[in-house]
Amino acid sequence: MPSLNPYLSFKDNARDAIEFYQSVFGGDLQISTFGDYEGMVQDPAEKDLVMHSQLTSPDGFVLMASDTPSSMPYREPGGSSISVSGDDEAMLQGFWDALSAGGTVKMPYETPPWGGRFGMLTDKFGIDWMVAYSPAQE
């Protein structure tokens, strides 16, 4: 079965970002650097940059990230958000608290007109997030 997974690009701090996301979501983290594969980096100073990383959380989230070496064009993130939603209020509050630490809240995590809780933020790595709690329907 195919899957759709966010893949985040960073200039040179993918390791810090993906380790931060591991602290938020938990799970198993795999990291490969450009230096792990011969010929993958032109500048030896960039050998420790992340070529590919994958975080697989206990909840089944898969988040991938990499750095962009100087030989490739880099574009700041924009125009998209990662959305985390569900019916576990405490878990989603924990995600909100952790993701917003050091970031910028765009819309507070509060009760919107449609119920539940919803908020938007940009984390300390420049990634936009939406967190939505919707009570389980009985």
Image: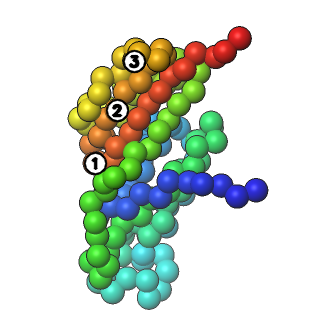
Spot occupied by residue 3 in the image (x, y as percentages of width and height): 65, 55
Query: Upstream in the sequence, badge 1 or badge 3?
Result: 3
Q: Is residue 58 left or right of residue 124?
A: right
Q: Is residue 35 visible?
A: yes
Q: Which mark is residue 120?
A: 2
Asked which secondary structure carries label 2, the reply is strand
Q: Residues within 10 Å of mark 2 (few under 14, many from 20)?
A: many
Asked which secondary structure carries label 3, the reply is loop
- For the residues carrying marks 1 and 3, which lies nearer the camera in this image? 3
Residue found 41% across the figure and 57% down from its top: 8
Label 3 sits on residue: 112
Spot occupied by residue 129 in the image (x, y as percentages of width and height): 38, 39
Q: Where, quadrant-wise, is the C terminus in this rendering?
A: top right
69 is higher (above) or lower (below) than 42 = above
What is the CA distance from the residue labelled 1 to the residue labelled 3? 24 Å
What is the CA distance from the residue labelled 2 to the residue labelled 1? 13 Å
Q: Amino acid at mark 1?
A: Gly
Q: Which mark is residue 126?
A: 1
Q: Residues within 10 Å of mark 3 (few under 14, many from 20)?
A: few
In this orientation, which residue lies closer to the viewer: 85 or 23? 85
Query: Upstream in the sequence, badge 2 or badge 3?
Result: 3
